[in-house]
Amino acid sequence: MGESIALHTRLKPGAEAEYAEAHANIPPSLVQALKEAGVRNWRIWRSGQDLFHVVDLDDYQAMRRALADHPANVPWQARMAELLEVQDDYSGNDSGIQKVWELP
């Protein structure tokens, strides 16, 4: 069945256009790597500098392990590190934002 994970990241001031441009041109190799790592869908919303991600996938921790050193993900994360206030180094054991409520 899988899981849905919510994530929050924050853009550096002035990085909005570059972030949008990068996501308009995601490399096919990264898309393939995400799919192979069990990602079924990844949606991102922006409010000011705040980014909210909802990821539907098989296993969040397995996905992070699979992508940590993946040759398609490493340059992507380096690019995102230029645009985000906090770089994701894939060293944590995070589980996303805690869910508080869901419509039954």
Image (cartoon, grey):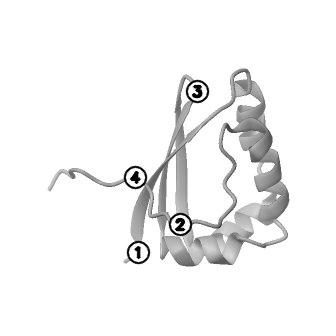
What label does residue 97 carry, if any?
4
- Answer above or below: position of 89 versus 85: below
Q: Amino acid at mark 2?
A: Arg
Give the residue type that dot 3 points to.
Gln
| Residue at 72% across, 35% down | 19
The residue that mark 3 highlights is 49
Q: Pointer 3 and pointer 2: residues touching (CB < 8 Å)?
A: no
Mark pair 4, 1: CA separation: 16 Å
Residue 40: assigned label: 2
Callout in the foreground (1, 3): 3
- Label 4 and label 2: CA atoms lie apart by 19 Å
Label 4 vs 3, first from the N-terminus: 3
In terms of sequence position, does the residue under pointer 3 or pointer 2 come before the other? 2
Which is nearer the eye, 36 or 98? 98
Please name which of the two marks, 4 or 2, marks the residue nearer to the observer: 4
Distance, label 1 to label 2, CA atoms, is: 9 Å
Question: Residue at position x 40%, y 52% from top?
Answer: 97
Query: Circle 3 sits in a helix, a strand or a loop, which is it?
Result: loop
Give the mark nearest the N terminus, 1 or 3: 1
Disc count in the image? 4
Residue 31, position in %: x, y?
A: 71, 62
Element on which disc 2 rests:
strand
The numbered dot on residue 2 is 1
Of the residues shown, which amino acid type is indicated by label 1? Gly
First in sequence: mark 4 vs mark 2: 2
